Image: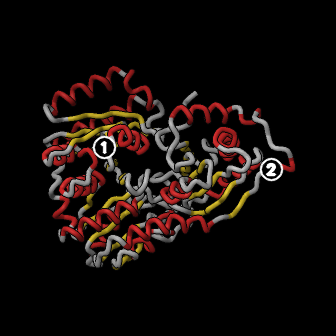
Amino acid sequence: MPRLFGTDGIRGTANLDLKPTLAYALGRATAHRLAAPGRPIVVGQDTRRSGDMFAAAIVAGATSMGVDVHLVGVVPTPALAHIAGTGLFAAGIMISASHNPAEDNGLKVLDEHGVKLDEDVEDELEQLIWSSEELPSAAPDALGLAIQDAGLLERYFEHRLALAAARPTNLHIVVDCANGSGGITAGRILEATGARVEVICNQPDGSNINASCGATAPDGLAREVVARHADVGFALDGDADRLIAVDSAGRVVDGDAVLGILALDRMARNALPNGVLVVSVLSNGGLQKAVEDAGGQIVRTPVGDKYILEGMLVSGAGLGGEKSGHVIVREHAMTGDGVLTALELLHVMTTSGRSLADLAARIPMLPQEQRTIPARHKDQWEGDPAMRRAVASAVQRLGPGGRVLVRPSGTEPAIRVMVEGPEPGLVTELADSLAALAGQRLN
């Protein structure tokens, strides 16, 4: 039986392979393992149509165990994480599939500190999910309550607004909210810096989250930045835990470049703990060279922001993240937050007096191509001789400094291929050929 929990919670197509019965069982399992009567859990969701269905199922499950559930409604994942970590709750559950299409959804469980669970605890929850009906239910007079508590979001606002006020700027910003939950918070927080803020893609209808907008499709934002003569653009994903930036000329600045900008600034101020930046195996070799040339060091982890955080805790690092735009600034939060990342980037731009384009130019990137291929047998690629031979041949052709990474997706039924090297044409050729072969062999 495949593992329920991937790199970012439990994911699936809503009401098909991710059913409300599973959310109900998760509510019971979470209440049994992480909570107790008198120790409530908190639940938030993004703007997907299926969010209400899953919230209702989680409430039914947890309250049947005698545990109260506080519902905060539509909130960004980092806001739910902040609320879960206030000390008021035994756990939090965020209903979101992040950057995935609207028909997908996901269930992310956070502990009392607002961080993702260790894998051993996820394994325990998984076993409890399969046997949830055997768990002891509460007596009728001891059932938990569902409490609508949207006011809890102000706790997140208080923290982020204080950070924004300490980072004054007069820049002109366009922010793309991906028709997701970031639209609840992004404009208010960014305006607290004194910036002129224009918000786009903030008309969620339940089915347009991430649809040709946001961090996974920043081309529209790039056009708007140029058309509106803005200084910078920020694209969030559907639950606002990641950020992709756009410079004033409409050029996309991905998470690796943002990490490099923040790391070099902190190193110059002697404010990068241990001189360490934690990144995933996907992060560009150009970022590594820029950081190492400046006297820092790179620690690489598996893909997934929970592994980034683990690497940061082990190494004592204060900054880490991924090419996808997840950035963790540990002095302010234990999870990625696209709006917080924007505040940090605005601060560097304003204090340095340099444009985003100038700052990004300090981190020259190696040519890199990534492909995502739907694959029914995503976990079996290493057992396929043709795939192994093709990967070995690609590594040989790239030569020193080249990299090939093939891995099963942790969030969808797909295989991901990354190719990096000094020659753009060869990198593209090899990425395309490996992707084509994976599509043939793994379906």
Task: Specify whether residue 230 is in view.
Answer: yes
Q: Residues within 10 Å of mark 2 (few under 14, many from 20)?
A: some
Query: What's the residue at 71%, 47% (across, down)?
Result: 62
- Can you tell which mark lies on residue 143? 2
Q: Residue at x 16, y 44 (%)?
A: 292
Task: Find residue 188 and report its image quarter.
Answer: bottom left
- Residue 203 to residue 308: above or below: below
Q: At label 1, which amino acid type do we have?
A: Val
Judge whether 188 appears above or below 407 on screen: below
* Left or right side of 333 for 104: right
Q: Quadrant of the C terminus?
A: top left
Which residue: 43% across, 42% down?
A: 306
The residue at which mark 1 appears reads as 279
Residue 219 versus residue 70: which sits nearer the camera? 70
Q: In what element is the residue under mark 2?
A: loop
Compared with 109, 441 (above or below) is above
Rounded to the nearest angstrom, the CA distance separating label 2 from label 1 is: 44 Å
Amino acid type, callout 2: Leu
